[in-house]
Amino acid sequence: MLAVPRVRIRRWLPAAVALTALLACNREPAPAAIGQRVEYRGYAMTVTNVEKAADFPGARRARQGDTLLAVEILIESHAAGVAVSPAHMWVAEPSGKSFKPHTTGRAPVLQEAVTIPEGGQARGWLTFQVPNGATDLRFVNELPAAFGRARLKVNLD
């Protein structure tokens, strides 16, 4: 008969479970779909609507071969330090090419907000110029440093 040594795991088990839970809490969430809320440590974002057009009233027209892609975003605060910064939001192609939002576009435009109070929200549109026929686009929001620069993603197709 083979002798198996007894190993005391009880002391290590709570630490291993705690470490696993901590890593799971800090993992970026999987990409969401349009209309689906994606949350990370009290920062919640929903892409509520997407529109494509060659022109939006008050915005410049898309260049030849491009289209304007307007993304309506709802940001909700369930924690301290939730901020809105369109400068940290973009649309990306699977190839890695990304598109920054324009300063004009579909109204009302999502405004820069230093901090949204806990329980508050911000809503508005960001407009991007993308190539005609672009597919598998993904909206990306890189969160503030207080949230570890995690990226919330929403598939737009």
Image (cartoon, rainbow, N blue to C red):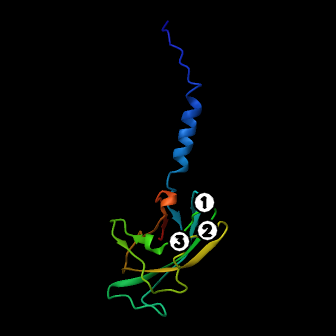
- Give residue 98's mark: none
Q: Of the residues under marks 1 and 2, which one precedes in the sequence?
A: 1
- Give residue 76's mark: 2
Circle 3 SS class: loop
Q: Residues within 10 Å of mark 2 (few under 14, many from 20)?
A: many
Which is nearer the eye, 31 or 114? 114
Q: Of the residues under marks 1 and 3, which one precedes in the sequence?
A: 1
Query: Is residue 31 visible to the viewer in this orientation of the structure?
Result: yes
Circle 2 SS class: strand
**Residue flagged by tag 2: what amino acid is it?**
Glu
How far separated are the C-alphas under marks 3 and 2?
Answer: 10 Å
Q: Of the residues under marks 3 and 2, which one precedes in the sequence?
A: 2
Please report the residue visible at 51 percent of the width from the left and 77 percent of the height from the top. 112
Q: Position of residue 115 (x, y in %)?
A: 57, 70
Q: Position of residue 49 (x, y in %)?
A: 55, 77
Labelled pair 3, 2 in contact (Cβ < 8 Å): no
How far separated are the C-alphas under marks 1 and 2?
Answer: 8 Å
Q: Residues within 10 Å of mark 3 (few under 14, many from 20)?
A: many
- Give residue 42's mark: 1
Q: Which residue is mark 3?
A: 84
State left or right for residue 48 relative to residue 90: right
Looking at the image, is 127 positioned above or below residue 59? above
Circle 1 SS class: loop
